[in-house]
Amino acid sequence: MRRSVDPGRERVWRSAWILTVAGEPLRDGALVVRDGRVAQVGPAAAVLRDNPGVPVEDRGDEIIAPGFVDAHCHLEWSLLDGLLPPAGFAEWLGALLPLRMRMLSGDYATAARLGALRALEAGTTTLADSGPTGAGAAALAESGLRGLIHLEAFGRETGAQAVAAAARTAEGVAALDAAVGPRGRAGVSPHAPYTVGPDLWAALRAHPGLSGRPWATHLAESADEESVIADGDGPLGALFAGAGLTPGRWDGPAGAGPVARVTAAGVTAAGLVAAHCVRLGDDDPATLARAGIGVAHCPRSNDHLRCGRAPLEALRAAGVAVGLGTDSPASGGDYDLRAEARACRDAHAGRLTLDDDALLRLITIDAARVLGLHGEVGHLTTGARADLTALLPAGRVTDPRAAVLDAATTVRTVVVDGEVLLRDGAPTRVDAADIRARAAEARGRLC
Ligand SMILES: [Zn+2]
């Protein structure tokens, strides 16, 4: 006998195609959502037969896919769309800093709300945000999205000062626990090896309030990073000197890159998500795999900042978990993981063949694995969270995977934990017009 379920918490979703990602596409498929999880998925006829009386949401010609998972983004930079043209890494950072200085404290919340709205409209259901204020926590909770909010740490403190700085960061992260909502988790991000010295990173790692939480960083992003953490010189060294700041310096033999230096310092824990990992030596993919570090691959940002092409084929061969991240509108991204996937295919053309299935996995099940959420999200199988996106193809569908990735296909409906957060393109929880008006006002002061 079936246990009784509140009728509002049980629903059949039916559509022309269902992509479970875990298996082959289902034509005329259906899935049952019960208490926020997928209770059954299969051919529509069988699912409807097994669930008489359960309300049916028939999406017609749409394609139901797992909600997309963004392995790395910055909700607080959503106001900077198009304000920073393509440039070398240090040059770009030098242009970002004055914009950041002009942002008022309330602008971070405004930006984070806009970022969460844009992610929702792009079909994302889970995101990993990193930012200096943690404003993403409230934005995530308000939107209803699932995610990890990493509070960024910066500093070159040593000794007792590093311990004190780590304690302040841990307090900041703990304060986000109340804001982030039931679908979020607060974590920490030592921003990058050039902005966080080894002593502060070690102190963060040792702080009991930060262990077991989500961790993220930026690692091996640019050639500028390599020279500044090894020798303190290069364009980033000049940028830091001009600002009166000391860059992070990490020990290592001549020629050792950021992955080798940071892992040799013993400051990383399994589960760390490293964004970029473009500048890798021959041994680095195996080092990342051994350390249990996952990689958020951000091809559009890497292109925008002239960082080069991440060796995705070597990372995959070494068994490193890799998912895609949109990074931020400040560096060419726009929270649209389907666009990131298309850019990924183009970036690796000639070196690595990524078919539509592989690309879809990079923005769903693979990204979930990177974030430690494998089994929960990124696929539509029995027991998984009912996080899904329904998309309307522009024309006749012969291959639903290709149709989902097609730019002409539109995101119509987004569901998290069985709750509809976007219905036919309109958010259900947040006021999109109000968010956009406030964001336009704030952006007007920045440029
Ligand atoms: Zn980033």
Image (cartoon, rainbow, N blue to C red):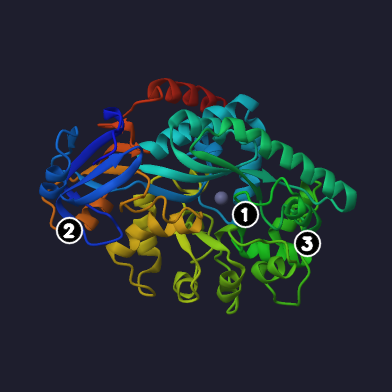
Q: Quadrant of the N terminus?
A: top left
Give neighbour class at mark 2: few <14, some 14-19, many 20+ (Cα, 10 Å): few
Residue 21: percent from the left, percent from the top? 30, 58
User: Considering depth in this image, is 47 or 145 the residue closer to the camera?
Assistant: 47
- Disc 3 designates what residue? 249
Residue 80: percent from the left, percent from the top? 52, 37
Residue 351, visible in the rendered structure: yes
Question: In front: mark 3 or mark 2?
Answer: 2
Q: Amino acid at mark 3?
A: Arg
Q: Amino acid at mark 2?
A: Asp
| Helix, strand or loop for disc 1 | strand
Mark with earlier residue (3, 2): 3
Give neighbour class at mark 1: few <14, some 14-19, many 20+ (Cα, 10 Å): many
Q: Is residue 32 left or right of residue 174?
A: left
User: Considering depth in this image, is 234 or 4 the residue closer to the camera?
Assistant: 4
Q: Amino acid at mark 1?
A: Thr
Q: Is residue 435 left or right of residue 97?
A: left
Estimate the spatial distance between the alpha carbons at disc 1 and disc 2, rounded to whole Å: 37 Å
Q: Which residue: 61% across, 73% down?
A: 287
Residue 352, relative to residue 438: is it above or below? below
Residue 230: percent from the left, percent from the top? 75, 67
Label disc, if present, on residue 399 of the rendered structure: 2
**Which residue is outermost to the bottom?**
282
Q: Is residue 279 left or right of residue 158?
A: left
Residue 447, visible in the rendered structure: no
- Disc 1 designates what residue? 217
